[in-house]
Amino acid sequence: NSKVIQTPRYLVKGQGQKAKMRCIPEKGHPVVFWYQQNKNNEFKFLINFQNQEVLQQIDMTEKRFSAECPSNSPCSLEIQSSEAGDSALYLCASSNRDEQYFGPGTRLTVL
Amino acid sequence: GDSVTQTEGLVTLTKGLPVMLNCTYQTTYSPFLFWYVQHLNEAPKLLLKSSTDNKRTEHQGFYATLHKSSSSFHLQKSSVQLSDSALYFCALRTASSGSWQLIFGSGTQLTVMP
């Protein structure tokens, strides 16, 4: 069973507000991924880190999100100005470079 | 670019029958395939990962074989149970960007009837 912890489980924001979610990866996993799963169950890769450094991020994340994965603190993903289209399940996954294990996700609703 | 195709969006079966969920992929790199299962309001859980070409991998009664010749990694079970009702995703770990992200198929909703 996955030991990835995500908080909060649910987040409700108004358009234009900031939305911040956190992830504690499994101990010993050096790589952390963030994915967005929309209402049609489609996954979109957002960003990933290896030992606090960004490996890759998509254009949307670079422009509208801020994310970090400091040592000895939870990783975080923050939408700077929420839009209705950001309503989705945000999944954090930690990896030992082979498999990826997902947390329960943060379900964001933007009103 | 890399991609994963799952042809069935919805599969409905009676308990005890066999099931096969299709997954084909496209990549120019060495393929690493995974099956994840997602129950309602839960995290995707890793079910299976591929091994070497033509070698079957099994877990919790499910099994799949990577066939590079047909670019496939179909998920099978010989006798489905009510608790198998869930959303199943096939995923390809891509090395094309150097970041090892997963590319997911569109998912297959499996519903098992009594």
Image: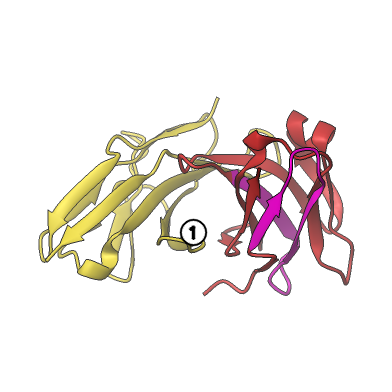
Chain colours: A red, B yellow
Label 1 sits on residue: B44
Characterize the local packing of mark 1: few (<14), some (14-19) or many (20 or more) Cα atoms within 10 angstroms: many
Give the farthest residue toward the top: B1
Residue A14 position by quadrant: top right
Query: Viewed as shown, does residue A76 lie left or right of B93?
Result: right
SS at mark 1? loop
Q: Is residue B45 in view?
A: yes
Residue A32 position by quadrant: bottom right
Quadrant where the image shows the N terminus of chain B: top right
Q: Amino acid at mark 1?
A: Pro
**Could you say which is closer to the camera, residue A97 or residue A52?**
A52
Task: Tell me where the magenta segment starts and ends, as one range.
Answer: A10-36
Residue B103 image point, x, y percent: 53, 40
Residue A20 image point, x, y percent: 79, 54
Quadrant where the image shows the C terminus of chain B: bottom left
Residue that appears at 60% across and 39% down:
A44
Q: Is residue A27 magenta?
A: yes
Residue B77 image point, x, y percent: 21, 60
